[in-house]
Image (spheres, rainbow, N blue to C red):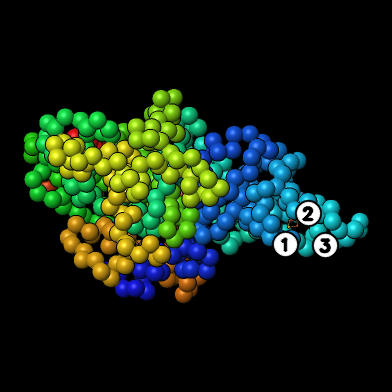
Amino acid sequence: MLNHEDNELMCRVGPGTPMGNLMREYWMPALPSREFPKPDGDIKRMRLLGENLVMFRDSDGNIGALAEACPHRGASMYFGRNEECGIRCPYHGWKFDVTGKCVDMPTEPEGSNFINKVRARAYPCRDVNKMIWIYMGTKAEPPPLPDFEVNTLPFENVGEPNIMMEEANWMQNMEGDLDSVHLDWVHKRLHKDSPPPPLGINGFYNPDKKPPIFDVEKTEYGAYYSAKRLMDDGKEWHRVNQFILPFHTMISAGPTVNFRTFVPLDDHHAMLISQSANPAGPISEEVNARAIDAFAQVGGYIARTHDPRSYFMTVANKTNDYWLDREVQRDRMYNGIPFVGNLPDRAMTELMCNDEDEPLYDRSQEHLGTSDVFVIAVRQQLIKAAKTLRDTGELPANALDPSTGRVRMGSFLLDPGTEWRHAVADRLNPDSGLPVAADVGLII
Ligand code: FES
Ligand SMILES: [Fe+2]
C-alpha cells in the first residue's frame, strides 16, 4: 500500500507537482508523425501533463508545440492560421514561430519593440522515426534525445506507433505492464486447446501450474525483472521486462523490440503508445497498417471531438463493458473481453475508483502480495526520483545521459538453476549484435 501523500505525489503530473516536474525533464513521445502529414497543415489541439497545447508542422517541416492560449489576451490558437513558418492567432493576428518567438504583431504601431517582449510558451519537438517527441522541461538547452532503439534504428526498421487512450491515471495503466502474473488470469484461455474466440487473439495458457517466481533488479535508469515459469520439458522460462524512468516499459512479446510509453494527458487520461522496432530489417507494410488501425476488430476508434482526450479512444470502452462476451467467458477465455491491444487490461485499471469526480485509485486501500514485487520496486524508484528532484534538484542518470536506459526486454528458455542475470546480459544489450530474444512467444 501507499499512504495518501505518496500516492498523490506518484500520480499527479500537472505543472508544479513533483512527478510532473520529473517527467518534464525527459523527452516524451507526444503524437505520431502521421498526425502532421504536410507543412502548413491543420493545427491540432493536444493536452500533455495537464497543459493545453496546440501542435503544428510549419512551412519548413518543423513541429511546434505552443500553449493553446495566446499570450496577448488568451484566445485559442487552435483557430489560428498555420502560414509562412508560424501560427497566427485568429483574434488580432499576432504570429508566433515554433520557438514561441513573436514574429509579427500587426496591431502595434511601426517602430514598437513590444514584439520583442512577448513570447508564447513553446516546447521543443523532434520528429524521429514516425514519432513526435516533446521536451517540456526547464532547461534552455534540452538534453539529447534518448538512444532507445526506436530512435536510433533506420526509419524503415521502426514501426508506426500503435496508440490507445486510457481513461485512468497513467500509473494505474502502467502498473498493468509491471505485473506479469495477470497474464495467468486476465489474458488466459480456459483450456490449452480452447478454440480461438471470434474477436481478438487466443490468450495465454500457463504451462506451469504454480505462479511465476519474480526476481527484480533496480538500476540507475529504473528496474527490470524476470518472471520465471517452469515449462513441460523442465526448462525455465524467464520473461524479462524493463521499466525505464519515468514512463517507459519494454515488454517481451515477440521477436521485435517492444517499446511502450504511458503518456499522461492529465491525471485521469493517458495514452499507451507502443512502437516496435526490428534490428534485423524493415517493418512490413501490413504490420504498419495494423498498428495504425489497431482496434479494427472491435469497432476501431470513436470519431474525434475538439477534445484531445477523445484521440485514440476505442469504440469498445467502459461505456459498453469493453465488448465483454459472456459466451466467450464461459467456454474459451478466462475473461470474455476481446484480447485486442490492452482492452482487457483497461477493464481492470480504469474502474478501480468509484468516484467519478476524483477517479484516482486510493492505494492506501490495497493489499500487495508476493507477485506485486515489481510494482513495488517501480513505485519506489519513481517516488525516490521525484522526491530527490524536489528536495535537492538532482535528476536520475537517464535524464542527463541519453545512452542510459538503452536496453532491451527478452524471453529466454534456460536450463534449470541458471543464474539468469548473467545468462541474459548480452541479449538485453542492443549493442551486442544479437537478435531480440524471443525463445517463447507471449501467447503460448
Ligand atoms: S488574443 Fe491572440 S492576438 Fe489577441
Ligand atoms: Fe495485460
In contact (CB < 8 Å): disc 1 and disc 3: no
Position of residue 380 measured from the top left corner of the image (x, y, whole percent): 33, 65
Badge 1 density bin: few <14, some 14–19, many ≥20, Cα 10 Å: few
73 or 379: nearer the viewer: 73
Asked which secondary structure carries label 3, the reply is helix
Mark positioned earlier in the residue sequence (2 or 3): 2
Task: Determine the residue positioned at 38% across, 35% down.
Answer: 299
Seen in the image, is 390 located left or right of residue 297?
right
Which numbered marker is on residue 73?
1
Check mark 2 vs ligand 1: CB closer than 8 Å? yes or no.
Answer: yes
The residue beneath circle 3 is 114
Give the Cα distance between marks 1 and 3: 15 Å
Quadrant containing ligand 1: bottom right
If you read the primary sequence from the N terminus, does the residue marked by circle 1 or circle 3 appear first?
1
Task: State the residue position of label 2.
Answer: 92
Q: Compared with residue 242, is residue 157 higher up or lower down, i.e. above or below? A: above
Mark 3 residue crowding within 10 angstroms, few (<14) / some (14–19) / many (20+): few
Distance from mark 1 CB to nearest ligand 1 atom below 8 Å = yes
Residue 134 position in % (x across, y down): 55, 50
358 or 3, nearer to the observer = 358
